[in-house]
Image: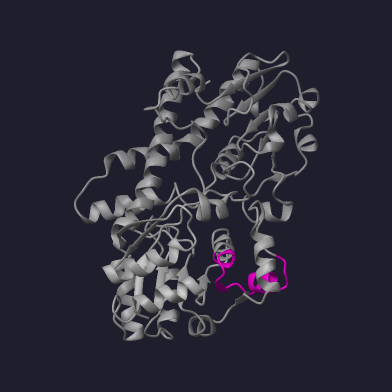
Amino acid sequence: MDHNQSSSAIKERSLTISVFGQGKMGLPIDVVFLEAGYNVIGVDTNSKIVDRINSGDIPIIGEPGVKEGLTKGMTGKKYYCTLSVEEAVKSSDIILIIIPIMLDENKNPDLEPLLLTLKNIGEYLEKGHTIIIECTVPITTTNGIIKETLEKVSGLKAGEDFGLGFSPERTFSGRAIADIRDNYPKIVGGINSKSTEKLSMIYNSIAHKGVIELTATEAEAVKIFKGVYGDVNIALANEFAIISEKLNIDVSKIIKASNSEPFSHIHRQGPGVGGHCIPVYPQFLINIAESRNVNALLTKTGRKINLSMPEHVIKRIIYGFEKVGKHLDKSKITLLGLAYRGDVKEHRYSPSIDITNLLKNCNPRELVLSDPLYTAEEVAEIVDVEFEQDLLIASLKADCLVILTDHKEYKESELSKVLDSLNKPFIIVDTKDIIQSTRDLEDGFLIGIGR
């Protein structure tokens, strides 16, 4: 399509968008395009996910509006999900890819799932298609191996025969639809001006705050730099916390006071970082920097500090046992939270996993993990530990509670209900600042990270 044809099709919402990847970010994107009036085809390689979606059993929790939006789309014959790449590509005008890119065992980006998807798409690519990459990739990937792969398989010229660009996903779990549609401008970057113009028109039709136009490589860098900023800032807070422990001062109070000035934006200390983003993207930057003979020293240091935090949590637990005169190997320890972040069912790279495994090596009499969002069967596939979903049962007769996730179920008012069932004197290690009081409990000892 030329500019006028594209503009008219977008205005009339006569385009069909296929979204490759029907996960925690792909499904909200489906809904935003559906709400804007487009036809959407969801594509996934997992037949169970495809079958669940088409039957109305939407495999996502904690994302307002997703189930309702997809159900409405299916009822109105504007959305369905498929395993068939051929069907999706041939039926679409816009092809959007959002599949997770993780690290391999050598800490290199594992691009194989993405490259396989691109090869499959390339077999059916036609002139006039536009391909948008929303999954986070190393800087220069869109203009490099993505473009090369599509051109090689399709025999078409990127930027001329088909549009190609990158638009970083900018969402926070639990408010994905609002973030895509309402909260931020959409960043777009094509491999050439023609592609950028096409992406800009598409996203202007769904993003209420408009778009920011960059090149594809600049758009890739936006997401990577933001992730590295988060990792380094949390590492700085963790370094402050460790120093504060030695000075016997409360780092949480200090950070809050510092951030009362508008130029201070110190993040919160914690047991480490998890999720798809912050633990992964710094390594993307380190790799690309080293390929250009640049030592990303600060980025590496931030990674080193955050990776060390699970071991620091173990030290805090041991310190707590020393303070109350108990022996760890004769005690029951209950870990609260498997997910890396409160009220989100996501455990990828969660510090809780490392902390659990490190504690097992300390040989406590009993070690129990609890998380209201997971079942025993799910946890058994993630970490080898006794599991009890119910907070009261998991905490019964525990000598030590370790709060690793800030679920709403672990609020101070909820935790107060289990105190009488603990073995006194007990220890609470609060790595998430859920318990705001810094005084010692009447029958136990409360510590945190930097508190």
Q: Residue 214: tell me if it is visible.
A: yes
Apparent side of residue 279 relative to residue 190 in the rendered image (left or right) = right
On the image, which quarter does residue 49 sit in? bottom right
Start-end of magenta stretch: 33-57
Q: Position of residue 396 (x, y in %)?
A: 79, 32
Q: Most extreme residue toward the left, as rendered? A: 293
Q: How has the structure been colored for display?
A: one colour
Front in this rendered view, residue 237 or 295? 237
The answer to whether residue 185 is above or below residue 126 is: above
Q: Residue at x 75, y 43 (%)?
A: 388
How many numbered discs? 0
The answer to whether residue 340 is above or below residue 263 is: below
Q: Position of residue 429 (x, y in %)?
A: 61, 27
Q: Residue at x 52, y 83 (%)?
A: 91
Front in this rendered view, residue 157 or 396? 157
Q: Position of residue 62 (x, y in %)?
A: 65, 51
Is residue 224 one of those drawn in magenta?
Answer: no
On the image, which quarter does residue 4 sit in? bottom left
> Which part of the image, by quadrant, shows the N terminus?
bottom left
Apparent side of residue 9 relative to residue 41 in the rendered image (left or right) = left
Is residue 39 one of those drawn in magenta?
Answer: yes
On the image, which quarter does residue 339 sit in? top right
The answer to whether residue 306 is above or below residue 383 is: above
Front in this rendered view, residue 254 or 347? 254
Apparent side of residue 102 relative to residue 191 in the rendered image (left or right) = right
Q: Residue at x 30, y 38 (%)?
A: 298
Q: Position of residue 159 (x, y in %)?
A: 29, 75
Apparent side of residue 1 relative to residue 52 in the rendered image (left or right) = left
Q: Residue 192: tell me if it is visible.
A: no
